[in-house]
Image (cartoon, rainbow, N blue to C red):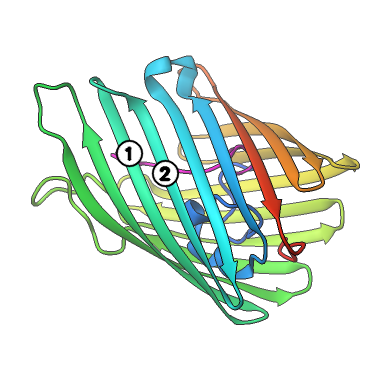
Amino acid sequence: MAAFDDCGSSAKTLSLGYATVALADEASVISSNPAGLGFFNQTGFQASLSRLFELDELSEKELYLVYPLKSFSLGAGTYVFGKANYYQEMVLTFALGYRLKDYLSLGLSSKYMRVSFSETYKALSALGMDFGAVARIRDNVQIGAVVKNFNQPELLDNSDDIPTILSSGVSVFAFEEVTLALDFSYDERNKGQLHFGQEVELIKNLPVRFGIQTSPARYAFGVGFDFERMTADYAYLNHPVLQGSHKLSFSFSWGIESQNR
């Protein structure tokens, strides 16, 4: 696994098989596609906690903040993976989303990435940049694209330890209660990956989600609980060899009601 691989997400993103490039409905878009910020008109935050493969040494802690200002929104986030004095990745992100039109938003983020080991070894750091776009081509269809680490950051000189990732996707809000999402991502290490997710709200304020991805083939599922301005989400992602991963997220927003999907 490359350093900072799939760093930053939410329980909803996980349960949809990471098929969220074209979605713009939670603060973790700061990590998945900063262009989604342009469609926000609510101030809010999102916190997540997870354990990969049931191991405490592979825990993830995340916090994202969004602050909208007319046609653009500011975002900030922190992501911590691993265990101090063992192996730990930390990412500090500052993002800007700008809505050019009611149907088009662009986004840019700057990330300070740091890897630390035991006290015997010196920590390594790099600065990464992401650029993305989200467009609403119909009332019920959104498309998106993002290039992560387009500046090709390196922890070590002449290395490829932080991959540049290209992703594109489409989200279809087939009905008020049903959302479908399909993404394709590519990088030199994992080559092409397909991600598919669906969300169905059979019971009001209780969406159920399912997702799959290829290379490697993995499946995910989860559930959400919406309480007006508060949202709690749970997700499980399997692994073909190791134990699965669990993730919990909590979001809270205030201000004018958001119009993004």
**Crowd tier of the residue under label 2, counting other residues whose Cα lies within 10 Å: few below 14, some 14–19, many 20 or above:** some
Quadrant position of the N terminus in the picture: top left
Do callouts 2 and 1 mark residues in contact (Cβ within 8 Å)? yes
Residue that carries the numbered disc 2 in the rendered image:
78
In percent of the image, x 78 and y 60: which residue is there? 173
- The x and y percentages for residue 24 are 63, 60
**How many angstroms separate mark 2 from mark 1 (CA)?**
7 Å
Residue that carries the numbered disc 1 in the rendered image:
90
Q: Amino acid at mark 1?
A: Met
Mark 2 or 1, nearer chain start? 2
- The x and y percentages for residue 3 are 28, 39
- The x and y percentages for residue 193 are 47, 48
In percent of the image, x 82 and y 59: which residue is there? 174
Front one among 86 and 135:
86
- Compared to 166, does 134 lie above or below? below
Q: How many marks?
A: 2
In percent of the image, x 67 and y 80: which residue is there? 102
**Crowd tier of the residue under label 1, counting other residues whose Cα lies within 10 Å: few below 14, some 14–19, many 20 or above:** many
**Residue most toward the right?**
203
Quadrant position of the C terminus in the picture: bottom right
Front one among 170 and 90:
90
Q: Is residue 6 magenta?
A: yes
Dot 1: element: strand
**Residue most toward the bottom?**
101
Report whether 20 appears left or right of 150. Answer: right
- Compared to 169, does 84 lie above or below? above
- Compared to 67, does 121 lie above or below? above
Quarter of the image for residue 103 reads bottom right
Q: Amino acid at mark 2?
A: Thr
Q: Which residues are magenta?
A: 2-15
